[in-house]
Image (cartoon, rainbow, N blue to C red):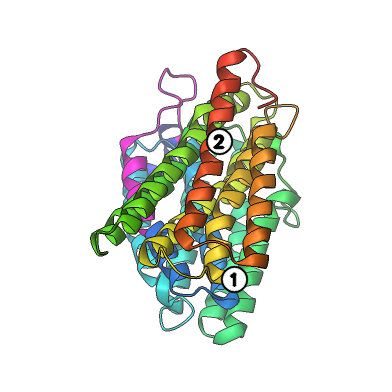
Amino acid sequence: MVSLTRHAGLMRDKTSEHRGRVAPVELFFDLVFVFAITQLSHTLLHKLTVQGLVETTLLFFAVWWVWVYTTWFTNWIDPDRTPVRLALFVLMLAGLVMSISIPSAFGAGGLAFACAYVFMQVGRSAFTVCAIGTASESNARNFQRILAWLVLSGLFWIAGAFAEGNARLALWAIAIGLEYFSPWVGFWVPKLGRSTTGDWDIDGHHMAERCSLFVLIALGESLIITGSTFEKSAVTPATVAALVSAVVGTAAMWWVYFAIGAERGTHHIAHAADPGRVARVGYTYLHIIIVAGVIIAAVADELVLGHPGGHVALPALLAIVGAPVVFLLGNGYFKWLSAPYFPLSHLAGLAVLAVVGATEFQFHLSTPLALSLVTTGVLVLVALWEWLSLTRSKGAPHHI
């Protein structure tokens, strides 16, 4: 504990010129989550049922939560310090165990998943309490409250691992619900009180860049799945068209997020009067929707590459149309934080997708490939709309 008692040495120096820098060890840590995203996509692909969707969503919430809490951790604690790097390496190992266990989390791998997840959440928070010490009383007390909530949720995670079927699902839903609910009540704990967003003295540039990088991870994983699926498929005009649609759709999602949203979001949080609130709403919560849209898109692309022709089954319809809907909703609400209006381009795209989805559900007019080409076209049109609006009014792209 001697190294941890030198509290100032483990805290980020937010007055230095490198205060917003993402350290190489943080990028190294993210590599585990490339695998986690792949596991989630494959799990959903092989369980395209209501039960499978619920279970995969819960696992996705857990994966995102452990990653984003680690991002908050490295926002305060200096990842270039040796004890912090070692802590991240340990978290990587636990994260690898968690990722490996994702496909069997609601079966034989439940205990491994729960133990790895709880170890990461509780262990990292306990380390943070020790690392902060007396250097920042408000942050130390904040992490004491966080630790208390994570210990409580951890009991439900472990209990769920020893249950089966819907009992496990219910206990884990309580656990993740406690974790997602706790920030909204300031992690209130008897005698320790509650935190406020004003207590969260964060580096906005760092938070924005970390979350942008996670979106990039998800987009990259989508391309990996597309390439590996195409490599196993027969080369036909239909599969080539499906490949092009998938790549163009991924590029359009990149454009929709990075061309305006990411940069404007970074400026907004960096100059916000209460950056902690922006980080909680815009980056901790709303980015869940954005990343979920990318993951669903990866599933849709694999479905289309595997079966480009024939009838569009309901699961495929929900994936192909649902992916851009979820993605545009997440981006729209995220951009709304730094603009007076929900983007008109996103509203138009959502309206078109609603018509396309309803028409296909009612009349069954399309093949999976044709539907994919249409939804990709919608994403491209939204990206072009934003680009044209930005070039016409670079100073205030508020109505895009």
Is residue 22 a member of the stretch shown in magenta? yes
* Residue range of the region highlighted in magenta in the rendering: 11-35
Query: Which image quadrant for residue 214?
Result: top left
- How many residues crowd mark 2 within 10 Å: few (<14), some (14–19), many (20+)? some
For marks 1 and 2, the one nearer the N-term is 1
Q: Please, is residue 353 above or below residue 331 in the view?
A: below
Residue at point 31% right, 53% down? Answer: 240
Residue at which label 2 appears: 381
> Is any part of residue 41 visible from this angle?
yes
Please indicate, yes or no, whether residue 68 appears anywhere in the rendered image.
Answer: no
* Front residue of this view, candidates 18 and 372: 372
Reading the image, the residue beneath label 1 is 54
Give the residue drawn at x 58%, y 28%. 386
Q: Note whether 377 is above or below 326 in the view shown.
A: above
Q: Can you give x and y, in whole percent of width and height, for residue 39 in the image?
A: 39, 64
Task: Judge left or right: residue 236 versus residue 66.
Answer: left
